[in-house]
Amino acid sequence: MRSLPLRAALGSVPLLLVACGGDSPSATPDAVSGPTYYQDVKPIVDAKCVSCHNPDGIAPFGLTTYAEVEEVGPVAQLNIEHGLMPPWPPNAECNEYVADRSLTEAQKATFAAWVEAGMPAGDPAAPGDPIDVEQVGLSRVDVALEMPQAYMPQTTADYPDEYRCFVLPFPTDVVDGTKYITGFRAVPGNPKVVHHVIAFYAGPGQLAEYQQLDAAEDGDGYTCFGAAGGSGRPAMIGGWAPGGLGYDFPTGTGLEIEAGSAVIMQVHYNVIEAGAEPDRSSVEMKIDDTVERVAQVQPWTNPQWVEGNGMTIPAGEADVMHAFEFDPTLVLGGEFTLFTASMHQHNLGSANRASLVRADGGDECLLQIDDWNFHWQGSYALRQPTQVRPGDKLRVECHWDNSPQNQPSVGGEQMPPRTVSWGEGTGDEMCIGFFYVAPGAP
């Protein structure tokens, strides 16, 4: 694992900000023998880029026409070449995941050859076949929870990002006892300013604390960062990033919920392109009365780190690593199936890895992110869910870059490095793995 994030190693190379999706052709159809836009490049861009790069998307520009793609073609090629776009953080050699949005080697080569050839348009009357992109989706909506009213992001030029949490109680006529969430989707009210959404579950005993956090701040919601805040650490339900269509949970599994509970919806706003605009986002869920296996999203980390011991990240150090491993079957009471994996750090994070150290000595990589970016977090469903047995150990490993070059700027001035450890704030750090698990074999 490299210690220097790729975005830092590239230095002054101009980068696209987010994921790649009446023209003036640069060549006539019969003058081109290699890749052309309409026949070869447009299908790739439509499949892997347009979900963000469209007039209503979070991206700062569109990629829906030949002219738009041609204008940024060479810079886009640099981002593709260095693995920055489309944003798909997992290391491809670690594992295989459902709905992988990364480009294949053949697609990368096609785009590179097109740029090298001068970005010819080709024949708009004979477009190439669309690329079949694996999609997941929410099969049924039983409950939808929406922000009570539109919210205007509170940001500045120095801080174009805001993390805001909203408390959304479950309706009593739907959740009138023990129920199970079996599918999830977040619906951004204004995709121009909503960067991502994460939903957490607050049980009946936790709800009052989050309602107090909400009441303590003016307006709807309350300021949060990284998670939902509070002392109880509500369980994660699911998340959304641009292009996400929602998903059903693995067949026969679901997350248990109780009457008198709520969803804590964290919305990450970014107004760098659209400016501050109102948003009224919501979450939708599939609810069932029973499931075969009660699942849970397990946040696993070193308890000593949470208590403030052993996760020191010294000021000025460019590569600091901390790792933790334990037998998770001791927590869950026996063997279980692990379906999805995600990792969480804050802004100094540079890389991380979650793996299983098998009882026989083998190492099974679950998720490896070599260039951590706090603003592109995600949960990744394993193509083949894996069984965890007694004696296996789950290992969570994180790297941080606390060098002077990797510090935040305040008011246009870069801050000096300081020693950092575990904490909830933007200047603190974390190292957590989140895993969707259910008892028994796959």
Image (cartoon, helix red, strand yellow):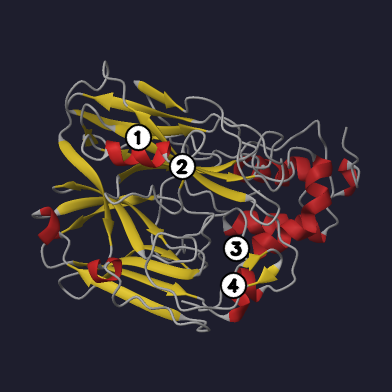
Circle 4 crowding by C-alpha within 10 Å: few under 14, some 14–19, many from 20:
some
Q: Which of the pair 21/422 is nearer the observer?
A: 422
Name the amino acid, label 3. Gly
**Residue at screen point 61% across, 43% down:** 154
Name the amino acid, label 2. Tyr
For the residue labelled by badge 4, is the local secondary structure a helix, a strand or a loop? loop
Residue 164 % position (x, y): 49, 43
Which residue in the protein does label 3 denote? 83
Check whether the beta carbons of the residues at disc 1 and disc 2 lie within 8 A of each other.
Answer: no
For the residue labelled by badge 2, is the local secondary structure a helix, a strand or a loop? strand
Disc 4 from disc 2: Cα separation:
26 Å
Q: Which of the pair 61/74 is nearer the observer?
A: 61
Of circles 1 and 2, the one toward us is 2
Name the amino acid, label 4. Gln
Q: Earlier in the sequence, mark 4 or mark 2?
A: 2
Q: Earlier in the sequence, mark 2 or mark 3?
A: 3
> Compared to 83, does 336 lie above or below?
above
Of circles 4 and 2, the one toward us is 2
Which residue in the protein does label 2 denote? 222
Which residue in the protein does label 4 denote? 407
Circle 2 crowding by C-alpha within 10 Å: few under 14, some 14–19, many from 20:
many
Which residue in the protein does label 1 denote? 263
Residue 222 % position (x, y): 46, 42
